[in-house]
Amino acid sequence: MLGLAMLAGCATPPSNDPEALEAYKEANDPLEPMNRYFFELNFAADELLFKPLAGWYYVALPNFAQDGVRNALRNVRSPVVLANDLFQGETDRAGVTVERFLVNSTMGLGGLFDIASRIGLDYHEEDFGQTLAVAGVGEGPYLMLPLLGPSNPRDATGMVVDMLFDPLTYIGMFAVSNIGLGADVVDGLDTRARNLKTLDEIRKGSLDYYATIRSLYRQHRDDEINNGRAPADGVGAGDQQSFKGVTSPQVSAAPLVPRREPLAKALPFFIIKEPAGPIPTTLEP
Amino acid sequence: MIVMRMIRTILFAVALAFVAAPAGAADANPAAAVFMQSLGSRAIAEMTDPTLPQPERQARFRTLLDEHFDVPTIAKFTLGRYWRTATDEQRTEFRKLFEDFIVQSYSTRFAEYHGEAFQVTGSAADESGITVVHSKIDMPSSEDIRVDWHLRAADSGFVIVDIVVEGVSMAVTQRSEFASVIQSRGGVAGLLEALRAKNAQSADSSTAE
């Protein structure tokens, strides 16, 4: 079955129609038939298994507990983000990652509460796929991975490298077996639970769900690689007549990444200020 | 997983996108920021009443769309390179179908609004005459969502040509979806057919509710 899908996986580029050839290049999806096959498979697995499980998770766990799960997983995986901050030479962001880890591991009760984000140390994600992109590695053709979802050779490689920096990988190896896998499953369920309605909405509103997801994935990865600094290629960007893959001019704006208060400055403020947001209520029974 | 998180972000932002609060600093074009602010106040007042029947919500959304979005330009952009090869009749029909498609797929999302705060954070101009108004939506239980509004000057002030949520452009996403449909259904005629079917189906389900 799998072998057949692989064999049928390669689409042939259209040779005689220049418009079609252009569209083929823009989609950058030479394995589209195979990718669509796995997309369908993932969709079926989601409908039969992940969606119902995520539904139960959503109903069974109160919101603050779900946030706790996510916060704790993020905190444990701080080394992944830190390593990639450093690989990319983003020393300021690396500092945020370290400060977040220190604050949340202590005042946040081992990472269960994201205290750091309320004193201006917002969470950011960094992964080795982004590091490769910053180093100039191209994304390669689009790939739909079984169970793991949309990717490409660059990001899939990054995923494997990031495992080396993930403490759960080593805990899994030497102490508690399968903890890494377990964490990934919980992480996946948590993410899925947060998106129960929204994915359905996207699907209902699309003519071609597969193509929509492909485009969303690419644009969002580009944004992550640029750390939200570069403008996207929209209607207003560049030459409106040609509609080719235009790159828009750099918008000279204030940085979109929120400026943060240095930790030293924010700490007294944090201690004096009554905590706002969800934490007071979450501590009540 | 990345995809799911961002999809949620996008849907929310598009649904909430119109709620405005005081404009912040770094305004290259204060008039544009003020425009987004007043449009936001109006949209939130008109769209988010949970008791509003769906047909009425759609009608209001269409009014906002017609008044404040440059629908013809967006439609042309989303057809991409196929605009040139489309016949006049196809272009006219596409504009109409595209607008209905947008109204039906986006208007329902306002029902998801839960009072998250929307804040214009600044604006910037680029050389192509587009003003980008930056905004963020404060989510109570997750990170803020970054939404950029691409505006073009018009007789009436400004019109919106694109919404970019966390780096994801609505227009670009729509364009690549349409391109894929055109490829698999053998041309613009195939896309028009798919849009007609989709719109009819959405109309059925919204009256059934």
Image (tube, coloured by chain):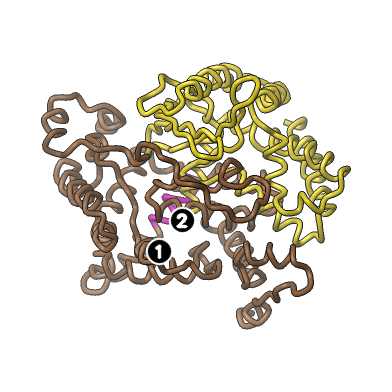
Q: Which portion, as a residue range, is magenta?
A: A186-194
Within 10 Å of disc 1 (Cα), the crowding (few <14, some 14-19, many 20+) is: some
Q: Chain A is drawn in which colour?
A: brown
Image coordinates of residue A50 in percent, x first then y, are: 51, 56
Q: Please, what is the three-letter code of the amino acid marked with disc 2?
A: Arg
Is residue A51 a member of the stretch shown in magenta? no
Image coordinates of residue B202 in percent, x first then y, are: 75, 38
Location of mark 2 (residue): A221
Q: Is residue A234 above or below residue A267?
A: below
Q: Which secondary structure dominates the residues rendered in magenta?
A: helix
| The label number, if any, that marks residue A133 in the structure image | 1
Q: In this view, does A279 lie above or below A171?
A: above
- Residue drawn at x 41%, y 40% is A252
Residue A119: quarter of image: top left
Separation of marks 2 and 1 at Cα, in angstroms: 10 Å
Q: Chain B is drawn in which colour?
A: yellow
Within 10 Å of disc 2 (Cα), the crowding (few <14, some 14-19, many 20+) is: many
Image coordinates of residue B10 in percent, x first then y, are: 52, 41
- Residue drawn at x 27%, y 37% is A259
Q: Please, what is the three-letter code of the amino acid marked with disc 1?
A: Ala
Q: Pick the quarter of the image with the C terminus of chain B.
A: top right
Q: Are marks 2 and 1 on the same chain?
A: yes
The mark closer to the camera, 2 or 1, is 1
Is B45 on the left-hand or right-hand side of A169? right
Is residue A192 a member of the stretch shown in magenta? yes
Is A262 on the left-hand or right-hand side of A73? left
Q: Earlier in the sequence, mark 2 or mark 1?
A: 1
Q: Is residue B28 above or below residue B34?
A: below
Is A276 on the left-hand or right-hand side of B17? left
- Classify mark 2: helix, strand or loop: helix
| The label number, if any, that marks residue A282 in the structure image | none
